Image (cartoon, helix red, strand yellow):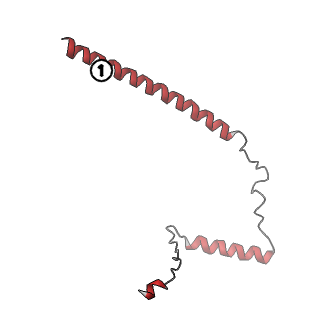
Amino acid sequence: MALKFLHLPRAKKYNVQYRFYDPVKEELLERERIIKERLGIKPDATQPLDANYRANIKGQFRAAMNQATRTSAEAKRKSNRRLLMLILFLAILAYLLFIW
């Protein structure tokens, strides 16, 4: 019991097993990296790949929300219509059972 009391838990190691591994592609990328280092070419991650690239984010969230609101209103109408049909059906069924 004393040994368990003094035991400190260790962090579990995480080992990722990749599903898709292409050794040819990895070798090609490694060769490209080595050649670029020899030529002195440094990749610049801050610049987009295309010079004409411009982020087209402005207004997209609002447009998506308008679309979601439209579909939720349509779903609400369909739900109300189903509920009305169900009440109508049950009313007719109750009329036929109790009156006849």
In terms of secondary structure, where does tag 1 sit?
Answer: helix
Q: Amino acid at mark 1?
A: Leu
Q: Residues within 10 Å of mark 1 (few under 14, many from 20)?
A: few
| Quarter of the figure with the N terminus | bottom left
Compared to residue 19, the image places residue 55 above or below, namely: above
Q: Quadrant of the C terminus?
A: top left
As drawn, which residue projects farthest toward the bottom?
3
Furthest residue toward top: 99
Residue occupying image coordinates x 53% and y 77% = 11
Left or right: 82 in relation to 57: left
Q: Is residue 47 above or below residue 94?
A: below
**Residue 57 position in % (x across, y down):** 71, 44
Can you give x and y, in whole percent of width and height, for residue 56 in the image? 72, 44
Compare residues 76 and 27 and report the one nearer the observer.
76
Percent from the top left, x then y, of residue 71?
54, 32
Whether 4 is drawn above or below 92: the answer is: below
Residue plotted at (74% across, 48% down): 55
Q: Residue furthest left?
A: 100
Classify residue 53 as left or right of residue 78.
right
In the shown orientation, is residue 72 left or right of residue 84? right
Q: Which residue is found at the position 53% from the left and 28% from the top?
A: 73
Residue farthest along the right direction in this orientation = 40
Residue lying at 78% horizontally and 64% vertically, measured from the top left: 44
Q: Which residue is mark 1?
A: 90
**Residue 51: x percent and y percent?**
79, 53
The image quadrant of residue 60 is top right
